[in-house]
Image (tube, grey):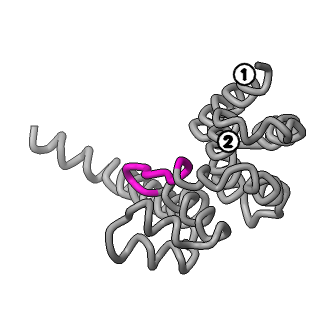
Amino acid sequence: MRQIIMNYNQRYGSKRRLIISLLLLFGIFLNMSCFKRHDQPEVCKRFFSSGPRSEKRFLSHSVEDQFKLHRCSLQQIPSIGYHSAMAEGGEKLVPFLVEKLNAKHKNRYERDLTILAASQVLALLAISGDLDNHRYVVPLLERKISLMKFDVDKDEATDDLKTIKERLSK
C-alpha cells in the first residue's frame, strides 16, 4: 500500500500542486478584479467607522452624501439601507435621482448599485404619492434595469419597478 501511495504522489503529486496553485491564483485574481468592493467615498468611510448609524445622523448630510451613504449601506453585511430615510425628502428628490440614473459610471458594479439605490427610493416615493407627477421615470428605470448584470440586485430593482408601476396605475 505504501508503495502505491508513493508511486501516486510521484506521478500525480506535482500536477495536483500545480492545479491547486493555479486555482488559488485564479481565486486571488477574481477577488482583486471583478468581485472587489470598490473604494468607498470618504463620507462613507467616516459615517460607517464612527458613531451610531442613526437616521438622524444620516439626514444631517446633503442629499448627494445621503445617496452615497445609501449606496454604501447596500454593501454592508447585513445590508442596512437608508432608502426610507432618504425618501423623506419627497418629490424634490426625483430630479436628483434621475440625474444619478443618467450619470456615467466607472464600472458595472457601481452602475448596478446606483440603479438599485435609486429604485428603492423611487419605489417609496411612488408609495407616498411623490412620484405621481413624474411618470417619465418608469421607462428610464426600465431601460436602466435592463442593463443590470448582477441578478440579485436586478431582481430587487425589478420588484421596485413593479411597485412603482402598480402605484402609478391607481
**Image spot of residue 62 (x, y percent):** 62, 72
Q: Amino acid at mark 2?
A: Leu
- SS of the residue at dot 2? helix
Where are the magenta residues, as a range?
76-84
**Image spot of residue 92 (x, y percent):** 76, 56
Residue 166 shows which numbered tag? 1
- Quadrant in which the N terminus appears: top left
The answer to whether 136 is drawn above or below residue 102 in the figure is above
Residue 70 shows which numbered tag? none
Q: Main secondary structure of the magenta part?
A: loop
The answer to whether 164 is drawn above or below residue 89 in the figure is above
Seen in the image, is 121 located left or right of residue 51?
A: right
The first of marks 1 and 2 along the sequence is 2
| Residue for point 56% across, 50% down | 83
- Quadrant in which the C terminus appears: top right
The answer to whether 112 is drawn above or below residue 43 in the figure is above
| Residue for point 82% across, 62% down | 103
Residue picked out by circle 2? 125
Are there few (<14), some (14-19), or many (20+) residues within 10 Å of tag 2? many
